[in-house]
Image: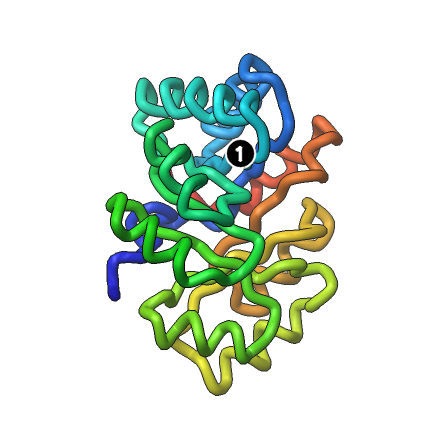
Amino acid sequence: MTAHEFGPIFGGARVMVILRDLPPPETVRLANRAWDLGIDVVEVPVRTAEALDALRATVAAGRERGRLVGAGTVFSPDRVREAASAGAAFTVAPGLDLAVADAAHDHGIPHLPGVATPTEAQRARDHGLTWLKAFPAVSLGPQWFKAVAGPLPELRFVATGGIDADNAADFLAAGVKVVAVGSALSDPAQIDRLAALAGNEG
């Protein structure tokens, strides 16, 4: 299985914003703000029916601007189906469930599973998943990524959980490909500060 490739989704991006538990209009507003600042990749977790509405609205807004929107907290094949129906370009999960990855593959969208140990990372790699979400990243620490890169250099990590504008650069310096910022966005200044790390051209 080789379809779970996030290179084309992230491109040169180094920052992804996670817009969690917000009403659809606010989700769209913040997504547009991120896009205006050059943060191209947005994830909308879909834990509730309202969150699915927010995903649909953000997908529609992204389509007008040529931006891709993914669905987060996707931890069952049924939720994969809902996310795909809402137009998600990719799915993200807090943990590693190969059935969920396979369901995303069947819907033609890549899946980013969560891992927190070398065993999980190796299991994901053996299933063809080389882009992984490391969660919770702040508990793992930047050195974790340097250590795992030794035996598993082909893996590409998205660091999620406890990331903000103050520590994001440390994780990027440790070899993380993308930092994902969610809860920290309750501080309105975070998106502006993160834009400096986004690494996008244009």
Label 1's element?
loop
Residue farthest along the front direction in this orientation:
78
What residue do we see at 38% from left, 56% from top? 101
Residue 80 position, x and y percent, is 40, 42
Residue 41's place in the image compared with 130, above or below, is above
Vertical side of 186 occupied by 138: above or below: below
Q: Does residue 89 appear in the picture of this structure?
A: yes
Q: How is the image coloured?
A: rainbow
| Position of residue 133 measured from the top left corner of the image (x, y, whole percent) | 52, 58
Q: Quadrant of the C terminus?
A: top left
The residue lying toward the viewer, choosing from 24 and 194, is 24
Mark 1 lies on residue: 46
Name the spot of residue 174 as percent of width and height, x first: 58, 69
Q: Quadrant of residue 185?
A: top right
Which residue is the extreme one toward the bottom?
151
Q: Is residue 134 rendered to the left or right of residue 4? A: right
Q: Residue at x 46, y 26 (%)?
A: 55
Image position of 157 (left or right of 190): left
Q: Quadrant of the N terminus?
A: bottom left
